[in-house]
Amino acid sequence: MADFKSLRGNRILVTRPIREKSKFIVDKETDDALDAEYLVNLNRLTVYAVGNLVTDINVGDEILVDLSAINNKPVIFEIDGKDRILISTFDVILVW
């Protein structure tokens, strides 16, 4: 499943949605701005892994996250060939 042994604390890893790349060539700053704009429009993120202290959210659940947590320097890294976003349980608003 994952390239790591366990996720610790009140943290949640969610799958970062893939934004279709523009057919136009843009600079890095513009591309980052488009990524940030895309994240603002997200409604549901799929939970990939939960920390050992998380009790009411499970892998596979969909969550609505406070977008300020994602837009303000998110922790994004690659696991299993896909980008994941690390968030706190305190940033979760809804669980489906």
Image (cartoon, rainbow, N blue to C red):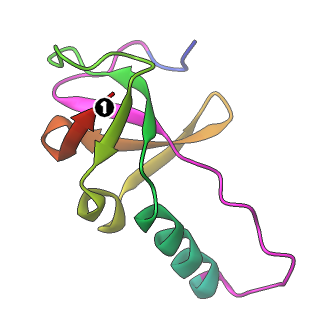
**Residue depicted at x 55% and y 69%:** 35
**Residue depicted at x 46% and y 19%:** 4
Q: Which residue is mark 1?
A: 12
- Which sits in the foreground, 43 or 51? 43
**Quarter placement of the N terminus:** top right
* Magenta stretch: helix, strand or loop mostly: loop
Q: Name the outermost residue toward the right.
A: 23
| Left-right relation of 20 to 10 | right
Amino acid type, label 1: Ile
| Left-right relation of 95 to 43 | left
Q: Label 1, secondary structure: give it.
A: strand
Instruction: Answer with the quarter of the image where residue 54 lies.
Output: top left
**Quarter placement of the C terminus:** top left
The image shows residue 89, relative to residue 22, as above or below, that is: above
Q: Which residues are magenta?
A: 5-28
Instruction: Answer with the quarter of the image where residue 30 lies.
Output: bottom right
